[in-house]
Image: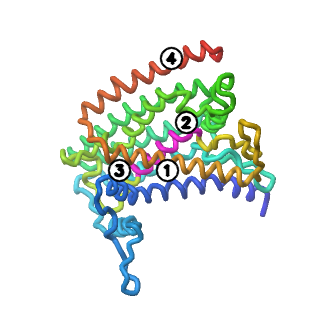
């Protein structure tokens, strides 16, 4: 194998990992949503889909439901309205899924992997302005929703698309403003640099090296604001105004089969992206407390040396664990709170989240000036 081919193959490892993890998380969330809601509501849940093997009914905790959903959506009639713009109508779900998947590309899931004399960044797309890239990909996802609503030639679908655009714009502005405090504290738009910065000790002159400087500790207000705006950007309860079933609207109201399934998948992918961003910006990213490149180094002087591959594996596992916990929390909110009215969601975004995010920027600037980091 040539040197160039080997380099390209090794560089493809982070891309393949992101594709595998994000797509499988998105598919698995169809099962998680059923099971978690069933547990919360004290009912049987997703246990009905089963297969017969030698006369035994096998359900496997309802894990066959995603498979049944896929078969159902692939075999349902592919309906296209008579007056629809056919090209835009068919392209819209692909646009939504693509940008939902691409948004995860700049989120680091580990530090570096040293293999065959090469150092590979555990990040599908390495950018000095990675945060701007993620925000751009999330923002571009609104085009899929507007395309679906407009191309359907249905007034209810158009209304849903307009609601989705308005909600996502208000949420994404609040997301960008809330992140600015994190950028100011760690001094970088590169999400890998921010993840590394969270491994440093928090106020070492007071706490020594016992407490890591995770974003949730350095920017607690930004964490709450970002998480709230992030939930809104996923368009799921309590911010599901673009698809209010009780009002018979929804940007995908004319879609059926796998095209409908792709819009549902896009929502799940956005949930994974928000969980990944929350982990990378506020929960230390891939950081494990007291784990350094050489192994564990504890504040009381003890240390445990570990091979590089073990350290890297622990970082990846830590990142995935945090993402799973955040997804569980997002699902918890989804099945706990009632949905907002459209005007309430808009008021929250423009009159609460955005002004508070700007206030957080001002407070962060004053604190940094006070401690001499401005």
> For numbered disc 1, what is the local secondary structure?
helix
> For numbered disc 2, what is the local secondary structure?
helix
Q: Which residue is mark 2?
A: 281
Residue 338: x %, y % from top left: 26, 41
Work out whether mark 4 precedes mark 2 in sequence or the reverse, and give the earlier one: 2
Asked whether disc 4 touches disc 2, contact meaning CB atoms under 8 Å apart, the reply is no
Q: CA distance from mark 3 to mark 2?
A: 35 Å
Classify residue 220 as left or right of residue 229: right
96 falls in the magenta region:
no
Asked whether disc 3 touches disc 2, contact meaning CB atoms under 8 Å apart, the reply is no
For the N terminus, the quadrant is bottom right
Q: CA distance from mark 1 to mark 3?
A: 34 Å
Q: State which mark lies toward you, 3 or 2.
A: 2
Q: Residue furthest front?
A: 300
Q: Which residue is mark 3?
A: 88
Residue 132: x %, y % from top left: 54, 34
Q: State which mark lies toward you, 1 or 3.
A: 1
Residue 82: x %, y % from top left: 22, 56
- In this picture, is 131 found above or below 319? above
Write down the region rendered in magenta: 266-284
Q: CA distance from mark 4 to mark 2?
A: 18 Å
Q: Which residue is mark 4?
A: 363
Asked whether disc 3 touches disc 4, contact meaning CB atoms under 8 Å apart, the reply is no
Work out whether mark 3 precedes mark 2 in sequence or the reverse, and give the earlier one: 3
Q: Quadrant of residue 236 in the image? A: top left
Q: Measuring 51% from the left and 30% from the top, which residue is drawn there?
A: 179
Q: Residue furthest bottom?
A: 54
Q: CA distance from mark 3 to mark 4?
A: 45 Å
């Amino acid at each position: 194998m040539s040197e160039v081919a080997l380099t390209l193959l090794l560089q493809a490892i982070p891309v393949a990992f992101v594709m595998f993890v994000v797509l499988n998380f998105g598919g698995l969330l169809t099962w998680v949503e059923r099971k978690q809601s069933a547990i919360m509501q004290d009912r049987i849940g997703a246990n009905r889909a089963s297969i017969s093997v030698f006369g035994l009914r096998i359900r496997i905790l309802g894990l066959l439901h995603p498979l049944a959903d896929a078969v159902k959506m692939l075999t349902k009639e592919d309906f296209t309205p008579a007056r629809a713009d056919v090209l835009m109508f068919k392209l819209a779900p692909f646009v939504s899924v693509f940008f939902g998947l691409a948004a995860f590309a700049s989120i680091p899931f580990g530090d570096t992997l040293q293999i065959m004399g090469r150092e590979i960044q555990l990040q599908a797309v390495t950018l000095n302005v990675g945060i701007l890239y993620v925000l751009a990909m999330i923002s571009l996802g609104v085009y899929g929703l507007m395309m679906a609503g407009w191309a359907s030639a249905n007034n209810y679908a158009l209304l849903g698309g307009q609601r989705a655009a308005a909600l996502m714009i208000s949420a994404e502005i609040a997301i960008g403003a809330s992140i600015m405090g994190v950028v100011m504290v760690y001094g970088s738009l590169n999400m890998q640099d921010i993840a590394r910065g969270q491994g440093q000790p928090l106020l070492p002159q007071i706490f020594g090296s016992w407490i890591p400087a995770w974003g949730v500790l350095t920017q607690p207000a930004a964490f709450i604001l970002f998480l709230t705006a992030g939930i809104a950007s996923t368009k799921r309860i309590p911010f599901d105004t673009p698809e209010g079933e009780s009002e018979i609207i929804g940007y995908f109201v004319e879609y059926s089969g796998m095209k409908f399934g792709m819009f549902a998948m896009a929502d799940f992918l956005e949930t994974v992206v928000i969980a990944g961003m929350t982990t990378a910006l506020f929960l230390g990213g891939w950081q494990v407390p007291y784990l350094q490149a050489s192994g564990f180094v504890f504040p009381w002087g003890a240390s445990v040396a570990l091979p590089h591959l073990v350290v890297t594996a622990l970082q990846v596992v830590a990142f995935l664990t945090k993402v799973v916990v955040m997804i569980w929390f997002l699902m918890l909110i989804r099945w706990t709170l009632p949905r907002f009215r459209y005007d309430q969601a808009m008021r929250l975004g423009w009159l609460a989240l955005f002004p508070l995010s700007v206030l957080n920027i001002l407070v962060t600037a004053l604190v940094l000036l006070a401690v001499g980091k401005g």
